[in-house]
Image (cartoon, rainbow, N blue to C red):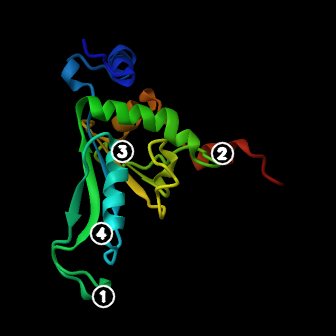
């Protein structure tokens, strides 16, 4: 029998009832859920084949699913970019792989960031969340001996929430460590009179 990911179990047992109570949903299909997680990293347009292969291998190790290479759609002379040239690597996670990745992100990777003070609270206006990580070596799957250079990682979390407040509440209940807003911090610090 296949084991249900711990974060998915937390979602069904804790998050869904909490959202039903706070938002007053009557139909279980109204409750926002995470649809997919997209991981994306860029590759220098002048990179050689070993860098491209290493980047694809690292992203595959992080995601637990084969990453695909993305190619440029048109040529841009100022960036020394030709049409069809490899410019990045991406992977879309759904189902069990998505829940396993989110749990590793929340429990292992984010706490490994030096001087971590939480993730930004800005959403895209439609309830979806984008997070940028400057160095993807925070994931334990990445071996520093095999990595020649550090690269960033974009994480897009697509939800079925209809607005930012619903999406923020969903991710907060799932355990995302959002930063305290500047207004709250400013209200708590004493001002010099």
Which residue position is annotated with label 2? 185
- Pointer 1 and pointer 2: residues touching (CB < 8 Å)? no
CA–CA distance in space, label 2 to label 4: 48 Å
Which residue position is annotated with label 4? 49
Q: Which mark is nearer the camera, 4 or 1? A: 4
Query: Of label 2 and label 4, which has the lower sequence position?
Result: 4
- Pointer 3 and pointer 1: residues touching (CB < 8 Å)? no
Of the pair 57 and 24, the residue shown nearer to us: 57
Q: Which mark is nearer the camera, 2 or 4? A: 4
Which residue position is annotated with label 1? 78
Q: Residue at x 30, y 87 (%)?
A: 78
Label 1: how many residues lie within 10 Å, few (<14), some (14-19) or many (20+)?
few
Which residue position is annotated with label 3? 61
Query: Of label 1 and label 2, which has the lower sequence position?
Result: 1
Place of residue 94 in the rendered image (x, y in percent of width and height, measured from the top left): 23, 36
Of the pair 139 and 26, the residue shown nearer to us: 139
Asked if one can make out residue 124 in the rendered structure from this viewpoint, the answer is: no
Q: Which mark is nearer the camera, 1 or 2? A: 1
Residue 135 is left or right of residue 6, and the answer is right
Asked if one can make out residue 54 in the rendered structure from this viewpoint, the answer is: yes
CA–CA distance in space, label 3 to label 1: 33 Å
Under circle 2, the secondary element is helix
Q: Is residue 134 above or below residue 160?
A: below
- Pointer 4 and pointer 3: residues touching (CB < 8 Å)? no
Query: Of label 2 and label 3, which has the lower sequence position?
Result: 3
CA–CA distance in space, label 4 to label 3: 18 Å
CA–CA distance in space, label 2 to label 3: 38 Å
Under circle 4, the secondary element is helix
Place of residue 28 in the rendered image (x, y in percent of width and height, measured from the top left): 22, 18
Residue 145 is left or right of residue 35, and the answer is right
């Amino acid at each position: 029998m296949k084991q249900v990911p711990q974060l998915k179990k937390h979602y069904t047992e804790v998050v869904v009832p909490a959202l039903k109570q706070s938002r007053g949903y009557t139909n279980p299909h109204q409750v926002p859920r995470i649809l997919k997680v997209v991981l994306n990293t860029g590759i220098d347009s002048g990179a050689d084949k070993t860098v491209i292969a290493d980047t694809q291998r690292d992203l595959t190790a992080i995601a637990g699913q084969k990453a695909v290479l993305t190619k440029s759609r048109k040529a841009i002379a100022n960036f020394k970019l030709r049409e069809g040239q490899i410019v990045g690597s991406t992977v879309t996670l759904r189902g069990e792989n998505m829940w396993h990745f989110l749990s590793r992100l929340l429990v292992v990777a984010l706490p490994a960031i030096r001087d971590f003070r939480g993730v930004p609270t800005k959403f895209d206006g439609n309830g979806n969340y984008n997070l940028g990580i400057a160095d993807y070596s925070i994931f334990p799957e990445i071996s520093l001996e095999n990595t020649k250079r550090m690269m960033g990682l974009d994480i897009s979390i697509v939800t079925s929430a209809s607005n930012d407040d619903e999406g923020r509440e969903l991710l907060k209940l799932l355990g995302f460590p959002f930063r305290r807003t500047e207004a709250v911090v400013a209200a708590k610090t004493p001002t010099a009179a």
